Image (cartoon, rainbow, N blue to C red):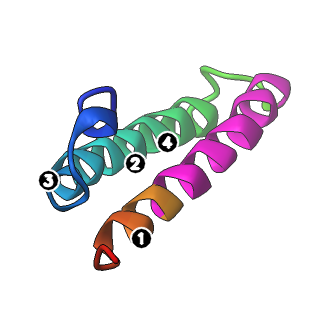
Amino acid sequence: MFIASYLSKDKKRPYIQKAIGIFDLLKFFLQIAWETGSMDNKKYAALSEPLGEIGRMLGAWYKQAQTPSQ
């Protein structure tokens, strides 16, 4: 994400896509930790909310990078 922030709009997409993939993997492992009882409900809830916001931000950034420059 750091590198993508310095690139032109057309070159950002692959970096943002990779960040979204890694982020999805993080969410998957978080859910597995919760489902197996390695993480209690309170910790899971505390992490899930900010991660949801980060996901929305990444999605918006990717969508913005897809629109043609004007």
> What residue appears at the point 24 percent right and 29 percent down from the top-left corner?
3
The residues bearing labels 1 and 2 have C-alpha atoms spaced at a distance of 17 Å
Q: Is residue 55 left or right of residue 20?
A: right
- First-in-chain label (4 vs 1): 4
Give whichever of discs 1 and 3 has the lower sequence position: 3
* Above or below, 22 relative to 9: above
State which tag comes first along the sequence, 1 or 2: 2
Q: Earlier in the sequence, mark 2 or mark 3?
A: 3
Which label number is shown at residue 24? 2
* Residue 6 horizontal side relative to residue 59, left or right: left
Which mark is drawn over residue 63? 1
Q: Quadrant of residue 67?
A: bottom left
Could you give the CA–CA distance between mark 4 and mark 3, rounded to whole angstroms? 26 Å
Q: Residue at x 55, y 41 (%)?
A: 31
The residue wearing badge 3 is 11
- Viewer-nearest of discs 4 and 3: 3
Numbered disc total: 4
Type of the residue with mark 1: Lys
* Crowd rating for badge 4 (residues with CA inside 10 Å; few <14, some 14–19, many 20+): some
Residue at 60% across, 40% down: 35
Q: What residue sits right under mark 4 in the picture? A: 27
**Is 20 covered by the magenta stretch?**
no
Which amino acid type corresponds to the residue marked 3 in the rendered image? Lys
Q: Residue at x 27, y 34 (%)?
A: 6
Q: Which residues are magenta?
A: 42-59
Q: Quadrant of residue 49?
A: top right
Inter-mark Cα distance, 2 to 4: 5 Å
Local secondary structure at mark 2: helix
Q: Quadrant of the N terminus?
A: top left
Image side of residue 24 versus residue 19, left or right: right
